[in-house]
Amino acid sequence: MHDMNILYSAKLRLAAAAGGLALLAACGGGAGQASTQPAPVAYDLLFDGQNPDGTRLLYRVGLDGGAPQVLGAGYAGTRPHARADGKAIVYSSLPTDELPAQVMLVENLSGPAVPLSMNGPVTEREAVWSPDGARIAFHSQSEDPAGDIFTARVAGKALLDPRNLTPRQPGDPMMSGEVTPAWSPDGTRIAFTSYRGGTPALWVMDADGGQVRQLTATSTLHGDYFPTWSPDGTQIAFQRLNLDFARIGVLNVGGGLPRFLEFEGKAYSPAWSPDGKWLAFSGLLDGEYDIYLTGPDGPPLRRLMRAGADQGPAWIRRTN
């Protein structure tokens, strides 16, 4: 009881101090200065949505219950990814008969999209920004028909200093493509999916391509894709796909077996929120693809419903 009284008295003193600070701020703080406390950072969701009429555009939606809105001028593509400052995105264009998927850039989220891809008629897609916003990692088929993970520096509307981080090694199978890269929060590592073991599994490497190691076991029964890092860099969520089911797993980067989130339907392409509060994913339930939100350890579960098939979620910082 004595300890409880001490805690209660301490709470009263803290409350009184907080009230005094609030009164000082309301009165100008005694020095005529407004509060300099920064506004809390908020995040919205991006995703690509296929509409009932067959068109496919990028959308943005807040977590406050508002309806999803077409992003900017309307961009037809998939796999959007936002720069850390929330002021630019990259995404994959839709392939056509004349041109395969290309990496596209949108600055200020209002103007036209411009191609960043370097090689014209070669598939390049799945671009993601480095945490410092200076580079992107992406899948490119410019040196191998199966594709490799490249990085390049973004300078204006061009890519400079491209580097293949996963060139073919002696003993690799003929079709050993690498896809779906993801930067670690500190920018020092990249997780990705590789077929070098024969079937798709998760791997991780240093951001310069060194120190490559396997994270999930190679299996003929399933494939692992779309890694996304926890903000503290200790865990990776991913999509596990087999012939008749898809689910979201969470794995410790240091090793061990993954645990899987409970969801009644099929779950695809997770995206960990920068504040660590949510895992967003595309879920197929009752014949509908919608974006879902869940805690990293499971429920509560939220469904963001929209007419159409919504996939490829990513997070974007709100800038106003």
Image: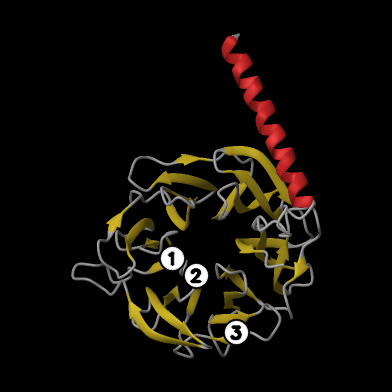
Q: Is residue 122 above or below residue 180?
A: below
Disc marking residue 67: none
Q: Is residue 245 above or below residue 7?
A: below
Task: Choose between 34 and 198: the one closer to the eye.
Answer: 34
Residue pointed to by mark 2: 128
Relative horizontal placement of residue 267, taking residue 202 as reference (left or right) = right
Give the residue type at disc 1: Pro
Residue pointed to by mark 3: 96
Q: Residue at x 48, y 91 (%)?
A: 120
Disc on the earlier residue, 1 or 2: 2
Residue 18 on image: x %, y % = 70, 39
Residue 129 in view of the camera: yes
Check contact, mark 1 vs mark 3: CB within 8 A: no
Residue pointed to by mark 1: 181
Residue 12 on image: x %, y % = 69, 26
Q: Residue at x 58, y 81 (%)?
A: 105
